Image: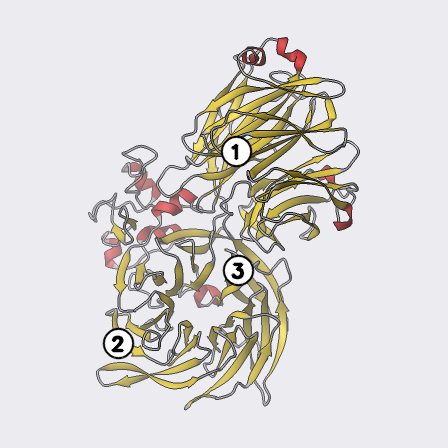
Amino acid sequence: MECTNCSVLVGCNRVVGALAWGNGGLAAFGASNVIALFDPKVSEIVGVLNGHTGPVNCVKWLDQTCLTQSSESVILSGSSDCSIRVWAVSNESNERRCLAILEGHKSGVTDLAWWKRSDGSLLVVSTSCDEFVAVWEASQTEDLTQDSWRLKQKIPVGFKVQHCVAVGSLPNDPDCLLMALGGTDTRIHLYFSDSGGDFHPSCQLVGHQDWVRGLQFHHVRQGEPGGERLLLASAAGDRYVRVWSAQVASGRDAGGSLASLSRLAPSSTIRTSNHSYSIVLESLLIGHEDWVHSVDWQPPTQSPSERENLRLLSASMDRTMIIWEYDEASKLWMNKESVGDAGSGSLGYFGGVFSPDGQCIMSHGFTGALHLWEAEGDGEGCEWIPRPAVTGHYGEVVDMTWAIDGQCLMTVSTDQTTRIISKKKNHWYEMARPQVHGHDFFGVSAVPCRRSDGSYTIASCSEEKVIRVFTSPGAFHETLGQKLTSDSAKQGKKPLGARVKALGLTNMSVFGEGTDNADVQASSMEDALEQGQDGYADGPDVAPNATPIAVEGPPLEEHLCQNTLWPEAHKLYGHGDNVFSLACDPAGEFLASACKAQAADVAMIWIWDTKSWGNVAKLQAHTLTVTQMEFSRDGRYLLSGSRDRSFCVFERQVVEGGVGFKLMKRVAKAHGRIIWGVGWSPDGKYFATGSRDQSVKVWAMHSDGPTDVPIHVLKLKSSVTALAFAPTGSLIPNGFILAVGIQSGAIQVHLLRIEEKVSSELMWSSNVSLSHGDAVRRIRWQDGEDGRKLQGLRMATCSNDHSVRIFELAVTR
């Protein structure tokens, strides 16, 4: 079996420093405990680096000159698991490997900085939540493997946490290094290293009134604006950006901003064996209205003789990024451009970076999405145009389901959002966010009964005793290029979208611009623009009644946050605790639900009629929480697994007054630990259960109920957390394909041969790069019209590592 990972969707960690853009064109960002590699040219994640056991807090790219092998790029990553990892990423193939693991901190790593000395050695400085700053040295940069590294120095900093670090060389003394530390004491601490020696405290820069969150050095070359000097940009929670200048002391007598400021501002002095440097505040940049989290200098040009403008990018929690430019005529820093998000769905940015050529900027925000802008035009006519970038969950993805036609994948997460993923222009994108909730989600189920107008229906459950049912609006189908067929859609009675009232949880239908008037309907982006429905009456910062509109390309994060909600059709009440799992029969006639339970009377499974949305049955068999349920293909049987280590099979029967369900068999102690996954074979004659006891058991189904003992047992090396049978057995005569997800994040695909003696064979197992970074929570095979168009099979997986992966598998025999 051949397997291809055709898509990875995951959000960026919500910490400062989790995003970096390399010289090779790829961007790297921390996503839970993995590093995702994002290619902005195709707007797609092209790979992941899997190895950390805790969330990744900071990522840095090294220049390609740091490795003798120019065909590889190097990435540094720091994590909450107290370690630093050095990665090699091939520029010519998909090969990615971990070169070294640096362990020395007792708490999570918060930031990294590096510098390559003139003698070829490489320094890496790391800050942490412990009482030390660590300095690592690699004397040989031929391969940067484990043996090349040593802990050169540990600098005590006390109990004041240092959030950020930067390293640079003094202008006229390239072998003399300056290290800047910033943290909770609001001061910038400067350390000096002379010609390869250790770092020693030099001075402190005082001025910020809140935590220092971002630092970066920039060497201004001779002949560039302002003259040769070393600039240090600092960002802090006091809403200000400060630019500090280190210059040979004689430069204080020259004209310009440095001379005028030095007479008024306090200065610090650093002395080397050849020069004396004065460090002063060159500029205070005022423009942000909330915490400033990061600063990034525009990368210098490759040609030393080419003159360039000095530009600095700052990112803030006020939902804006500002590009500051040094004006040589006035000797002042000017606000050159400001970009950001308008609307009420975002809480700002944690970081912003320039592209290697300076023509693009990228940020990561509170919702986990990346935001990308590209410069069009030159000079005063330059405009920064938003471009699609990756979006994804920033919390554990706990459940997912395919739509009836297989065109859309619906996911829910502990980040309190429901998201819909679909294929557009040969790439998988997030196309809608039907529900932005106030509670962490537990489950989702597609209701397969396609409505007469061709729309979708989904049900979700979360940390509440209510099941919410949603129907897809008109704007969603127009974005997918689907045409609705019913008279209500043609007459404008179909909701265009939905909105949520302030402090509310219910998605209310929207037919026009915040009204219920069916005559006011924007069926496309062009119609909305003509009716003026894209404007904000209260200004760009407030969008209380954002109007849903269809878009042609992949939606931007602003659009997803506030314009893609689905209207809520029903609420189902009755459970005694938070609803934990959902399942719908293939015909879409019944919805099964179960809640968290510590007693048998609460652990009942409720059956809902999807026509009336009334409760038609309560099935009592389990004594603890039902973890997963699944109907057989013909809808005749309902299978459930529970924390009480048992499974139950219920049979659908026709009774007086309607339809009922009868318990056929409950197998107590079917496993030695919690049952996390259950699944039916395509023909309904077999089913499998997976448990924390590291086993998958296959059971046979007969007319009088399931067998008392399994007909086959698969033993694995880790807890089983998810499983699913492939939707068709026609590819393998007398056999079935079973996918299994385990606690470590690995995925296995087994072939079950049903002959006189049941046997199994491992067909495919994910390697490190194709595995999740944490436990697999759900596996779903694509079925429906889109699934049947494939030559092979398509499988989606979700995990506690915040990611959703889509695989395409080809059976080679």
Q: Amino acid at mark 3?
A: Ile
Looking at the rendered image, the quarter that the C terminus falls into is bottom right
* 212 in relation to 721, above or below: above
Q: Nearer the viewer, mark 3 or mark 2?
A: 2
Q: x and y percent of residue 539 in the render?
A: 31, 32
Residue at the spot of label 3? 806
Q: Residues within 10 Å of mark 2 (few under 14, many from 20)?
A: some
x, y percent for residue 559? 38, 44
Which residue in the protein does label 2 denote?
Answer: 616
Q: CA distance from mark 3 to mark 2?
A: 36 Å
Q: Earlier in the sequence, mark 1 or mark 3?
A: 1
Q: Which quarter of the figure is the N terminus placed in?
A: bottom right
**Mark 1 lies on residue:** 185
**Residue 236 in sight in this render:** yes
593 vs 204, nearest the viewer: 204
Query: Residue 5 at what x, y percent from top left?
Result: 58, 59
Within the image, what quadrant is residue 182 found in? top right
* Foreground label between 1 and 2: 1
Which amino acid, mark 1?
A: Asp
